[in-house]
Every structure is written in structure tokens, then in C-alpha cells.
Image (tube, helix red, strand yellow):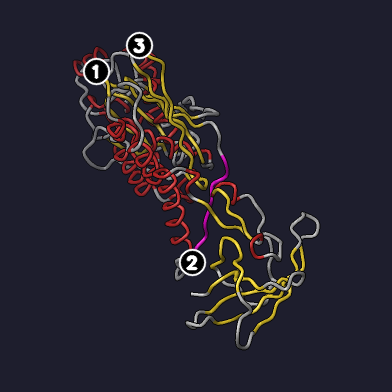
Amino acid sequence: MLWSCTRLPRLERAALQRLAWWAQQWSSQVSYCSATGSDEALLWIEIGASQRLLGEAHSLLAQIAAGLAQLQYRGELAAAPTPQAARLLTRLSDHRIVTTLPALQQQLTALPLRLLALPADTLLLLHRTGLRRIGELLALPPAAVAQRFGPQTTRYLQQLTGAVAEPLPSVPLPAHFHSECEFDTAVEDATALLFPLQRMLHELQGYLRARDCAVQEFRLAFRHHRQAGSELRLRISRPCRDAAQLLAVTRERLAAFALDAPASALRLTATRFVAPAVLQSDFFARETQQAQELQQLIDRLQARLGAESIQRLQLRADYRPERAWRSLAVQDADGQAQASMDAVTAPRPCWLLPAPQPIDPPAGPLANAERIESGWWDGHDAARDYYLARSADGARQWVFQNLRSGQWFLHGLWS
């Protein structure tokens, strides 16, 4: 096994727990400790089993450090075969990564005793006996150490060197994600919430990666002093777990959102999860990048203009031009099957008039005849012959003759 340890300034238990959820994007074995009276918090991640998939220890520690920086945390990281050794190595200025027990034993030999996580009175007693290096203490018989300095000291040394396993309680992932931030002073402007939201959304990103899922919606709840709380629901067009994209959508919504009253706390909640939208790409094609950029544009437009303002066109299995398509909301269009129009071979313009306009019979030759007889079942029966025609000014027109009345109509134009 190979444990990474991150030593952080003391955190509240809730914040440390969310950090443990976030850390499970690298491993399912995550544990934390914030001892009473201590000025530090510790986060352990078992990264040995993740190296083949996510990179060697140096790369993994660099990834964890970069993620912590996005969360505005600054910690000291190290890696070793045992949790206590990893904790000890975080106090060194260099040589913080040791991958084998023999290498660990060799490195511990020359390190000072003050680095051991032992009570202060035990360290003082060790110093008074003339011991200065960890190697000198490890060279003593375990029974003698237990008799002189207590069995807890022997057990700690055995866990440090890997002679005895140290079971750490793993942090389970909750079924729902929630993160809360309380403010020292009430916040009146909704856009001022973007700074704490950035951390919350990165915590959510780590949680989603740990569960291998994504979200399409989440909620922001605002707590107000002596007033009922308010809520903002955010929804995006496709499943997403990228914090930057979620923050961009949130920024657009908050720009047009007015708080009912100054907010004293903010809570982010996500309860519904879906499979992530994984887009495959190759070295040369830009289709994947373009699809992601289009998704981000749609999400930002919806956040700014409203979900109902962004529509998608969808084909319908109907030969009547005015009924061969329809507009749907982006989310509704995703789940609908697209109708096949392979049977339509005659050219059709994209510009249709809102309603066919009566015209005089066109002069000159007509081309590309297409007969449409359909709609008897819904009360909008159509019997038409369509043609390509040109107006007096040379514009290309799409016209048809009603086979029942003989009247001619203009239905569409080409640019």
C-alpha cells in the first residue's frame, strides 16, 4: 500500500468531511483526523492501487495539490507505505515520497525524534535519556521501549515502520451532496456569492468524479436573518461534472437574480445524478471540442435568457412542409427520437412563410414537381403540387397549386 497524507491547518469537521468526499476521486480509501487541541487536520488517501490508472506517486501528489489549490486550501503533502510515516514526512522540506518499507526504514534512521507524533512528555523523556534520532529509538528492543515509555509508544513505532497494520476508518460517500457556507457579515449582492461558490462547485466536482456520475440540476438555498429562506434552482442542458462550466452557468443566473434579503448563509445541494456525458475524440478531429463549446454556449444562454428562450428544431414524420418540424426545449429535444425524412428527395427551402400566400399563376417554366397528398386523418388534408419558380425580379420561389381549388400559393423562398 502507498498512503498520501495532506497536513492542513485545522478545519471544521464538516469542511474536512467534504474534503474527504472530494478526495475519493483518487481512491475509495480515504480517512481524516482532526485531533482535539491540535492545530492541524490530516487527510489520508490510499494511492497505491490508483497508480496504474492515474499516474505514479509524484504525479498523483501533484494532482492532489492542484485540486487543493482550486479549493483555496494549502497543505503539505507526502507519501509513504504507512499512514503514520506519510504524516511524519509532511514535516520534511524534501524527500517526502518513499514507496517501499526498506527505503522508509533507511530514511527514518537519521531523522530527529521531534518529528514523531508522540505526546510532548514522552518526547521530553526520550530526549532526557540521550536519544536524538529515530533510528536510535527503533534500535531498542520493543519490550524495553514499552516498559520505559509505555505500550502506546511501541505500538506507534510498529505502525510507523509497517510492523503492525494501522486500520483507518474509510469515509463513506453520502447519497446526496450538500455544502454550506456561513458568512461573517450578511451578503446583499448575489454576485458576491461567486467566491464561496467556486469552492463548493469544486467540492461537487470531486464528489461526482468519485461516484462516476454527473448532474443536470442543483439548488442554491439562501438563509436570511429573521426571514424565510429563498432558493435558486439551476439546470443545464446536458449532464456535467466540470466545476468551471457549472460556475459559468451559475454566474449568468446570479447576475439576474435579486436576493429577497441579505444572505447570512449559502447551501448547495445536489440530489439527482445521471450518467456523465462522455465524448470520445481522436487526435485530429475537433468535433468533441466543438460539441462541448456548443453545450457551454447553450447553458449560458439559457441561464441568461431563460430555459424557454432556447429551442431546438426537430423533424417530424409528416410530408406537409408546415408540419414536418417542430421546436422543443433543449432538454425535451434530447430525449426525442428524430424522424427520418430520407424519402424526401425534392429540394425544399429553409425559409417558409408563416402561412401560404395566394398568388397569380406563375409565368414561365416550372421545375421539380412534387406532389403531396396527406393529412386526411387530422382534419388538415392537403393535396398540392409543388414547383420551383422565379419571380419577376429573379427570386427563387417555392410555389404550389391546390389540386382541389386550382388556386396557386407561395409557400417558401430561397435566399
Which residues make up the magenta segment?
A: 274-281
- Disc 3/disc 1 C-alpha distance (Å): 52 Å
Which residue lies under the disc numbered 1? Answer: 123
User: Could you tell me which residue is drawn at 33 percent across and 14 percent down?
Assistant: 225
Image location (x, y in percent) of residue 195: 29, 34
- Disc 2/disc 3 C-alpha distance (Å): 56 Å
* Mark toward the start of the polypeptide (3 vs 1): 1
Categorize mark 2 by other alpha carbons within 10 Å: few (<14), some (14-19), many (20+).
few
Which residue lies under the disc numbered 2? Answer: 282
User: Could you tell me which residue is drawn at 50 percent across and 36 percent down?
Assistant: 28
What residue type is disc 1 on? Leu
Query: Across the whole image, how many numbered discs are drawn on residues?
Result: 3
Which residue lies under the disc numbered 3? Answer: 226
Image location (x, y in percent) of residue 341: 68, 67
Instruction: Say left or right for 392 vs 5.
Output: right
Principal secondary structure, stretch drawn in magenta: loop
What residue type is disc 2 on? Asp
Can you tell which mark lies on residue 100? none
SS category of the residue bearing label 3:
loop
Up-down relation of residue 49 to residue 286 (above or below) = above
SS category of the residue bearing label 2:
loop
What residue type is disc 3 on? Arg
SS category of the residue bearing label 1:
helix
Q: Is residue 123 shown to the viewer in this render?
A: yes
Up-down relation of residue 325 to residue 97 (above or below) = below
Residue 122 belongs to magenta span: no
Viewer-closest of 356 and 41: 356
Viewer-closest of 111 and 60: 60
